[in-house]
Amino acid sequence: MIFKKTILIFIISFFFISISFASSSSSSSSSSSSSSSSWSSSESSSSPAPSKYIYAIAVIENYKQQQFLIIDPWENNTILSESLQLNFEIDDILIVEESNTFIVYSESTNQSLISINPNTLQSKLINKITPPIAGFEDMLQPSVFISEKKVLYKPVVDINGGGELSSLLRLDFESGKGTFVNISNENQISTAGSIPNVAYDQLNDYVFACYNSSNNNVLVAFNETTSDIIETYGILKNIQGFDVTMMFTDKLGNLFLVYQDNSGDVFVCEVDSILMECFGVFKYNIGTVPYAFSPYFLSRDKSSLVFITYIDENQFLLEVVDFNHGFKSKKTIFSNSYLNNPFNVYWVSLTY
């Protein structure tokens, strides 16, 4: 099982926010072929890069130092690097609001929702869960934060009662209450210690969960407001034997799963809930991953997948793949020179 590490941790969120700067302009990119039945690979564009920054918080030496970074990967430049003087540990960057205020999650002060002003670097507690929820192991799968409800879903392993069942922890920061959501049923019990995945369909107010049961991927949907199970779709037949690593919905509510094989290929497939199959729409090779972070995650606006892949000890390749427009992509190479040791980096937050 994968749990939080307390070595050099790099909590990083790639919030590609529309921040204007003079040297860039928006443009179209060349398309890659895609269909619902065949894999597509990304194709780069020669047009100018979008005007977007990387926002990151580097946590060094067991939280002795937390560093705030703004990086422009398209110009290969560090815009800002400031030390944060905080009395809590940041475990996840959830969103960056239009005002550029950070909303972060911390478990060092119960389960807390906190805002950080990027100009003053001052923090403010929004709310915390009282009493704190205990009896779980925090998993490094992507969380889902529903900002308009102030609700956070975290994939966890529930160790209450001596078991190790994968579950979802629902943290409601409006009410200050936290609950476990049981995503398995009596016929398909989740494999002990397996890592669940979660996605939110804002259009229909559904939460989708996917978990492993006896080497099968089981899909479940429930109502976010009531937590009532809407449907247990059952086993996705054509991806048996693969571990799903991420799931997401697009703006129309279509559900996508991400999984990878041992050769470094990452597959994105769209779920057909009638046929109970997941049809391949995109493939990306991440190659060898000599570092301890996930090289892909979802954009904040649900428009793109972002891939960070290793080139050499001094450089990373950033590629933004727009799945709402035929999987067109933008790519650039940026330096990791702002890190002390990139091979000791761990990315906890994979929001965007």
Image (tube, rainbow, N blue to C red):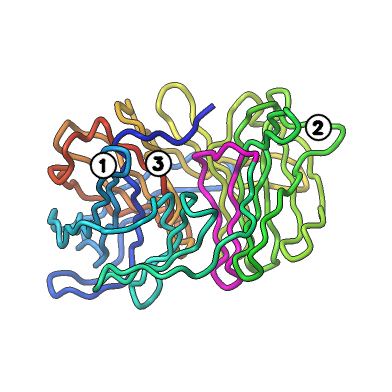
User: Residue 134, image x and y in percent?
Assistant: 63, 44
User: Nearer the viewer's eye, disc 1 or disc 2?
Assistant: 1
Q: Is residue 275 magenta?
A: no
Residue at image location 31% in from the left, 48% down from the top: 319
Quadrant, the C terminus = bottom left
Residue at image location 67% in from the left, 46% down from the top: 209
**Quadrant of the image occupied by residue 277:** top right
Q: Earlier in the sequence, mark 1 or mark 2?
A: 1
Is residue 135 in sight in this rendering?
yes
Question: For the residue carrying disc 1, how many other residues have a C-alpha within 10 Å: few (<14), some (14-19), or many (20+)?
Answer: some
> What's the amino acid at mark 2?
Gln
Q: Which residue is disc 2 drawn over?
A: 188
Q: Which residue is disc 1 drawn over?
A: 60
Q: Earlier in the sequence, mark 3 or mark 2?
A: 3
Residue 18's place in the image compared with 144, above or below, is below
Q: Which residue is disc 3 drawn over?
A: 41
Mark-to-mark CA distance, 1 and 3: 36 Å
Range of magenta residues: 135-156
* Mark 1 secondary-structure assignment: strand
Mark-to-mark CA distance, 1 and 2: 41 Å
**Quadrant of the image occupied by residue 211:** top right
**Outermost residue to the bottom:** 99
> What's the amino acid at mark 1?
Ile
In the rendered view, does 61 fall on the left or right side of 189?
Answer: left
Mark-to-mark CA distance, 3 and 2: 34 Å
User: Residue 149, image x and y in percent?
Assistant: 61, 70
> What's the amino acid at mark 3?
Ser
Question: For the residue carrying disc 3, how many other residues have a C-alpha within 10 Å: few (<14), some (14-19), or many (20+)?
Answer: some
Is residue 304 in sight in this rendering?
no
